[in-house]
Image: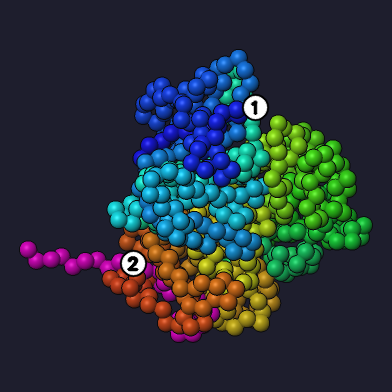
Amino acid sequence: MEYYAEWRLRGDRYSDGFGNGITLSSGESVREMELLSEEEGLTVFRGRKGHLLKVHHEARQGVTFCRTVLENPTEETAVLELLSSVAIRGLKADRIHRATSWWSAEGKLLSQDLTDLNMEPSWSNHGYRVTRFGQLGSMPVRGWFPFLVLEDSEAGHFVGLQLYCASSWQIEVFRNRPEISVQAGLADRDYGSWWKEIRPGESFESPWAAVAEGSSLQEVCDRLVKAQRPRIAPADQDMPVIFNEWCTTWGNPTLENLERIASRLEGTGVRYLVIDAGWYKSPEYDNWFNAAGDWNPSRELFPEGNIGAAADLIRSHGLIPGIWFEMENVGSEAHAYQDTDLLLSRDGFPVSVGARRFRDMRKRENRDFLDRKMIRLLRENGFGYLKVDYNECIGVGTDGAESPGEGLRQAVCASQDYFRHIAEELPELVIENCSSGGHRLEPSMMELVSQASFSDAHEALSIPLIAANLHRLIRPEQSQIWAVLRADADEHRINFVLTAAFLGRLCLSGDAADLAPERWQQALEAVRLYAQVRHIIRDGFTDTIECTVRDYSRPEGYQIVRRVLGSEALLIVHTYAGGANPPTERWTEGCRVVKRFGSPLDGELRGAVLWLRREKEEPRET
């Protein structure tokens, strides 16, 4: 396979082969460029008008990181309408694997033969076949994850890629001959209303992409995921357990409620107690959720609005206090909602989506406001954990740049710069990435934070299914999975939710203070086992995800996930209707069970975790 660049300069001819309107790839800009130099990790091309394309493909620990830089040494402004982060041609493949994603249904694998996509080359190798997919807006995994694996089933060879892009993006698989080409990067002019002016002497760099090869889908996904380099705060490096009170108080985090929760958690091994949304509620708002954006602590919930009293209370029980913000957005009842000069616009109007508008994070005034309202609150009150939520999508683009798509890209990059600013100001702070659950689970966002909300499927039966999907896409040590404990739940339901959280970061919520003693002991047993096996969750390799469930809303069947580290493994099993007694023997053969937690798997809605260790092989006679 060969690394090159897909790009388009305004005014150049489009590709023939009936591709105009469905792809900007393979046009005159690409066909007329000249190879200037080729060395390890860098290929340089020159366009027909003298523009330079530097294609970086740098190998690091089994993964190739790619980006493309366009330089304009000419005396005229160039208008760029397409620039790939990675482009590869000469591939052989007959099957593709993608990860679909919707709210509370993140990461479901879609595997398709190219013949089912009508992607065979024509009888004369004329006429492009194109499969393009992507996402428009500021929720980068809405619809699809920026992820693709191409499979050559005959050779048993897989090539996978992940884009590091939190704004609009696209991936294209295309061919007009037997070989396959693929390119990925920012959504282009046709797809994402993006173009960029590059003035004389200037350059523009694409987002990064990562490429991995392997002999299985699991191997390629593991390499891509482990190539991500997140900022893990010091307090979070040993993967402690979280308690978030959202599914406990539902926006009413009074001192009395927090005292009941914190008293129950003291000395249990849980490290964080996170105050979720609602801490700013006030009689002046009809709907406190739509008041997000002013960030004044509630005088109803805290004495004289002193939220530090809540933080002190949490610390008095040996826990690290956390708090929820939705810093980039403003609700319709917030005073900031009317400060339209500081908000993102499109076509001269504020981008208004339901009850949300969006701060223009390119503007100094917004960053200064958040420094005063958020960073100061965190610092002065000793909060050690920040949950950043994001509850709507900007859409295709914004004003303030030469194109709507470029305005969006700049706005999203400015938001990411502010995440970096928070970490510089508060280097000990644990930051959680949340976007109505999992809408921002892409690598460039995940590298800015310690962990992320895996989904908003807080109490759905699909929790273990979604959590397993994410093993292919983000590091399990960052994937925060909610185990919502209900006082009226039976033993098996409690086990079901607790065992699901072993697929990532264990986050408790719900009726902890009201659980019967025996149910609370179940939770504590899970917390103790989690502390013993978290090294497997963090460093292991997920070699098995066997899932017979098709319908996430009415699941039937079972799921078996195995994560292996050296001679140890975790086997995490969940059953649904019709899925009792799944064939676990296949994955336990030759192993002893060090410890088991959960229910017998002889019924539906059961969950179990088996900590396995491979038995030593007896020496053979020679």
Q: Tag 2: residue type?
A: Arg
* 454 is within the stretch colored magenta: no
Q: Where is residue 426 in the image (x, y as percent from the top left)?
A: 66, 41
> Does residue 16 appear to the left or right of 610 in the view shown?
right
**Residue that extends furthest to the bottom in the rendered view of this protein:** 602
Q: Is the residue marked by circle 2 packed among few (<14), some (14-19), or many (20+) residues within 10 Å?
A: many
Whether residue 440 is visible, yes or no, is: yes
The mark nearer the N terminus, 1 or 2, is 1
Which residue is at the front of the view, 238 or 421?
421
Which label was assigned to residue 476?
Answer: none
Q: Residue at x 61, y 24 (%)?
A: 78
Q: Position of residue 35 (x, y in %)?
A: 41, 24
The region drawn magenta spans 595-622
Which structural element holds mark 1? strand
Q: Is the residue marked by circle 1 packed among few (<14), some (14-19), or many (20+) residues within 10 Å?
A: some
Q: Which residue is drawn at 64% across and 67% down?
A: 458
Which residue is at the front of the view, 8 or 225?
8
Which structural element holds mark 2? strand
Please determine whether, in this image, residue 542 is positioned above or below residue 37: below
Q: Distance between the residues labelled 1 and 2?
A: 58 Å
> Does residue 383 appear to the left or right of 32 in the view shown?
right
Q: Tag 1: residue type?
A: Glu
Residue 456 appears in which quarter of the rendering?
A: bottom right
Q: Name the residue under label 1.
A: 197
Which label was assigned to residue 613?
Answer: 2
Camera-near label (1 vs 2) is 1
Report the colour scheme: rainbow
Q: Where is residue 317 in the image (x, y as percent from the top left)?
A: 67, 61
Which residue is at the front of the view, 106 or 370?
106
